[in-house]
Amino acid sequence: MKIHINHKEYEVVDGATLADVLASVGLDGAGYAVAIGTKVIRRDERAETVLPEGADITVIKAVCGG
């Protein structure tokens, strides 16, 4: 099935979890905020969040600065 992460299309297996997909694209480390559509998904929910066909995922990396 097809999903989108930050406007880029990916092909993933049916039943893939958010945690699995983020790990496969290298976005599973600390400091990332993740939303599916407009719903923010907490880090402890990512392993149990099964992605639907066409999921629109936004990943934002936290940065420090001054």
Image (cartoon, rainbow, N blue to C red):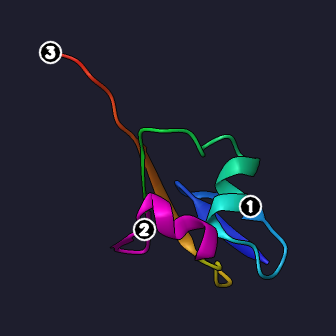
Dot 1 or dot 2, earlier in sequence: 1
Dot 1: element: strand
Dot 3: element: loop
Numbered badge on residue 41: 2
Q: Quote the CA–CA distance across marks 1 and 2.
A: 19 Å
Mark 1 sits on what residue? 10
Numbered badge on residue 35: none
Amino acid type, callout 2: Ile
Dot 2: element: loop
Residue 53 location in percent, x, y? 68, 84
User: Which image quadrant is residue 64 in?
Assistant: top left
User: Which image quadrant is residue 51 in?
Assistant: bottom right
The magenta-colored residue range is 35-48
Mark 3 sits on what residue? 66
Q: Which residue is at a point 42% across and 68% down the rendered structure image?
A: 41
Q: Residue furthest right?
A: 13
Q: Which residue is at a point 62% across and 66% down the rendered structure image?
A: 18
Q: Quote the CA–CA distance across marks 1 and 3.
A: 35 Å
Amino acid type, callout 3: Gly
